[in-house]
Amino acid sequence: MRYGFVIDQDTCIGCHACTVACKTEHEVPLGVNRTWVKYVEKGEWPETKRFFSVLRCNHCSDAPCVEICPTTALFKREDGIVDFDTDRCIGCKSCMQACPYNALYIDPGEHTAQKCNYCVHRVEVGIEPACVVVCPEQAIIAGDLDDPTSKISKIVATEQTFVRAPEQGTKPNLFYKGVEATNIDPLGAVPLTDGGVWRDPDERLQSWLSVDLTPSNGNGNGAPTGPIGNLNEVTSEPTEPRIDYGTKRGTPPRVVYNTEHPMPWGWRVSSYFLTKGIAAGLVIATALALLNGVDGTKAWFAWGAPLIAGLFLALTGVLLVWDLKRPDRFLYLLTKGNPGSWLVKGAWILSAFAAVIGVWFIAGVFGLSDLTKVLTWVGVPIALGVAGYTAFLFGQAEARDLWQSPTLLWHMIAGAFAAGGGAGLVISLYVDVTEAGDTAFAWAMVGGVLALGGIALAELAADHPTRNISDAMHHMTHGHYATEWWVGGLAIGVLVPAVLGILFLTGVVPAWVAAIGGVGAMAGIWFADDAFVKAGQSVPLS
């Protein structure tokens, strides 16, 4: 059994009855929707047409939201419905980053994620979903796609139908018949900037301070240059239909009504990148200092390094819990964890790291120098895990193509070297780490920032396989986040620490000048990662 939907856009009149019925059935608050109708207009007056599409959860056979959910709050039933257990949700918003269809939202009352659940309470007693019953044109068809005698199965088998984002490989079970191509392609029409058909214009988007979300490909107005996929053949090679911009004046299609989807992750996630990078990097840089011949019995290497690393690790935990919509449930990561989610694996890695540096600190306080040296080296591979696991977490965020970069792991590890070395140089202004320690920290910083710069240049030069990546890169390097990325991430975060670090290593400037570079390295990591996190979320998904 595999329940699904067919939306017949040939008969849909855009009346919003499905939206209202869904809100009533599930008591969905104002401002959020489990199902909604998107309006796209084409042409110029008087030759203008409006097209509708009903958007909602696609109940995917290979649902990325289920895989990334750290507490199994999202789960796939035997009948194919992707359901939700509100009592297990911690409000981490990772499912919102994994869903390519913008189907999930945070309930303003429960502070947990929610979405269409196919009205399972109705289906289980033999009643169709509320949206199906209320539709005046019978444009919504629900049923078992695996039953060849069902109406929905016959439509999919005999009619031309389409799915959204087939290239994501989620195998969606929501099919569209007779849909206008621009309606189900989020980059197929100019995004909503004037308030839409039922709202006043957004003044923020009418001023010189407006956010530049124009993509770099195509005609620069959000309209894609290529086709979207055939939905009966969910493959990585999309086929017809092609988008027809179809007016003699060349006016692009434009969105005139849609549901808003704010960025789920913001500055706290960007800051967590930095704090865990410093925690991991201090352990790595300390190990490099031991290799460089420093005295491991000195206070910094005996117990200072694990103490400061532990403080930054604790700050990382604070940021992670602070970003949850249900912070009271953060222990569910350990007590009800989904081992397939990298949020849970990351919690295990962070816990192991905390245990190692905790024992290291205690051993150092009691003067057990041989044990502290052993624990330093035990901590290095775990520190690399602390630095790098987020790359795999972001890899599970299937909706954000920019975050699927194969260089992200190396960016995270290079950032740990840069942040750890930079932090060590700053700390050396107040703590005696010896000249050999300063040298090791400077090498860690310089090597890290040069690697970060090389990775950034490689990303700029690389071919971007999807429009989503191309547009996100444009937003990061030429749009709203360009100053943050170029000036903050590359100039302050790479150029300044590289130059000052090299000048120190060659004996031209003293250690305090290199420490200025350390501050720049840490600040630059935050700026670059903040631009990266936000640019990845700046491309519309619906």
Image (cartoon, rainbow, N blue to C red):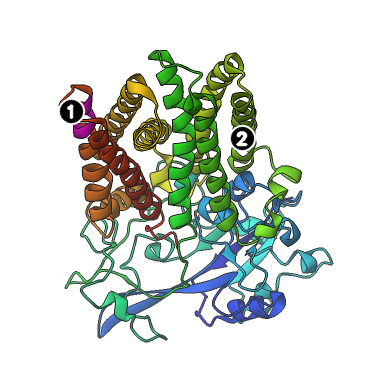
Residue at label 2?
A: 354
Residue at label 1?
A: 503
Distance from the alpha carbon under mark 1 to that under mark 2 = 35 Å
In this picture, is 413 found above or below 287?
A: below
Q: Where is residue 265 shown, x and y percent of the image? A: 48, 57
Question: Looking at the figure, which quarter contains the C terminus?
Answer: bottom left
The kind of residue tagged 2 is Ala
Q: Is residue 139 magenta?
A: no
- In primary-sequence order, the first of circles 1 and 2 is 2
The kind of residue tagged 1 is Leu
Please say whether residue 161 is visible from this viewpoint: yes
Q: Which residues are magenta?
A: 499-504
Q: Is residue 500 magenta?
A: yes
In this picture, is 444 found above or below 422?
A: above
In this picture, is 386 found above or below 231?
A: above
Residue at image position (56%, 73%) is 32
Q: Secondary structure at mark 1?
A: helix
Q: Secondary structure at mark 2?
A: helix
Task: Determine the main secondary structure of the stretch shown in magenta.
Answer: helix
Query: As rendered, which of 390 and 218 lies closer to the eye?
Result: 390
